[in-house]
Structures are given as C-alpha cells and as structure tokens.
Image (spheres, rainbow, N blue to C red):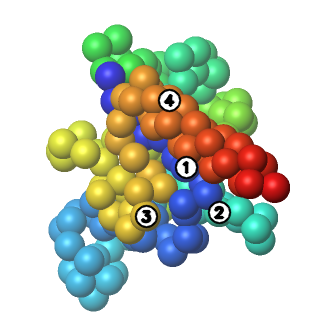
Amino acid sequence: MEQILVTPERCLGCHSCELSCAVEHSPSKELLAAVAGGEKTVPRVFVETDGKLNFPLQCRHCQEPACVYACMSGALSKEEKTGKVVVSEEKCVGCWMCVMTCPFGAIIQGSDHKVIKKCDRCPDREEPACTTACPTDAIQFISVDQFSKDRRRKYLTVFNSQREEAEQL
C-alpha cells in the first residue's frame, strides 16, 4: 500500500503542494476559476518551517489514529482496505476532539468553521495532488518498503563517499 512520505531535506518551501491541494479541493478544480471566482478552498497539506528546514505535513493516516478514537459522532473512520482515515462530513458535529488529539496538527476547521478538513489523498486521482505538484519529489506517494530501500541506498552512497575521503587522507 502506498503512503504519502516526505524527504524534508528536499523541500524548498515553495508551497506548490498547498496550492495544488487547495485547487484540487475547490469546486472547479481549476486555479484561475478558484481564484477569480472567489471559491473558498482550504489546503489539507501545510508547509511548516523553523527557518532551516521545511516540512510539508498532512494527515499521516495513522495505524492507530487517535482522531478516530476521539471522534464522538463517528464522523472519522479508518478504511480497512486502503488504510485511509476518512471523514463523513454529514456526521461531523464540530466538537474538534480530533483536532485536539491529532499529534501532527493535520486536522483543521473547514472554511465554514462547522466541520473538519483533512487530507483525503485525493480520492478522484491516482496520485495525490501534492505529490504530483512537488518539483523536488520531497513529497512522494510510494510504498513504505520502497521509501526505506531508497533511504538505505542514500545512506550507503554517503557512507562510501566519506569512507573514500578518509582513505585518501
């Protein structure tokens, strides 16, 4: 199963992911129409920074989602097949318990301030909008195993180059 995974060292802080997410969740699904038409659109990914490192953050669709357990109305649930944490907006009562329990701060109020909004992995697309918009592949829609394998390869490359430098001294 593929997940949205992030390599923060690659993030430029360009906010392309936020923009593409907002447009994808707008009624028109078009940038010009969303801006010119004054559509209220809310991104579900947020680029946070500490001034040194940028990090695009969205719902992690946790294995044990605290938000689902905290939801008193049953508006949040976890799909067994996909592993996604999904929102049933008609059930949301706006108690914000999910907002308070999400350890990542990835759940927000919608523009109407009545129901929550969170990453839904763009169900109408093969790949989430944020991942296709990222110019540096800082955000990838990839299997956890492949992501881990890529990290091991990167580590090996860095390790070998440092070893070779040490041998030359």
Q: What residue is at 76 percent from the left and 68 percent from the top? A: 52
- Residue 136 - label: 3
Instruction: Please state which of residues 47 and 116 is positioned toward the viewer in this rendering.
Output: 47
Tell me if mark 2 has few (under 14), some (14-19) or many (20+) residues whose alpha carbon lies within 10 angstroms of its own.
Answer: many
Q: Which residue is mark 2?
A: 54
Where disc 3 sits, the SS reads: loop
Mark 1 to mark 3: distance in Å? 10 Å
Residue positioned most to the bottom:
36
In front: label 3 or label 2: 3
Q: Amino acid at mark 4?
A: Ser
Q: Amino acid at mark 1?
A: Thr
Q: What residue is at 27 percent from the left and 88 percent from the top? A: 36
The N terminus, quarter of image? top left
Q: Which label's residue is closer to the chain start, 4 or 3?
A: 3
In the image, residue 162 lies at what x, y percent? Answer: 71, 49
Tell me if mark 4 has few (under 14), some (14-19) or many (20+) residues whose alpha carbon lies within 10 angstroms of its own.
Answer: few
Q: Which residue is mark 4?
A: 148
Tell me if mark 1 has few (under 14), some (14-19) or many (20+) residues whose alpha carbon lies within 10 angstroms of its own.
Answer: some
Q: Which residue is mark 1?
A: 7
Where disc 1 sits, the SS reads: loop
| Quadrant of res 103 | top right
Q: Amino acid at mark 2?
A: Asn
Where disc 4 sits, the SS reads: helix
Mark 4 to mark 3: distance in Å? 18 Å
Where disc 2 sits, the SS reads: strand
Q: Is residue 112 visible?
A: no
Tell me if mark 3 has few (under 14), some (14-19) or many (20+) residues whose alpha carbon lies within 10 angstroms of its own.
Answer: some
Q: Amino acid at mark 3?
A: Thr
Q: Which label's residue is closer to the chain start, 2 or 1?
A: 1
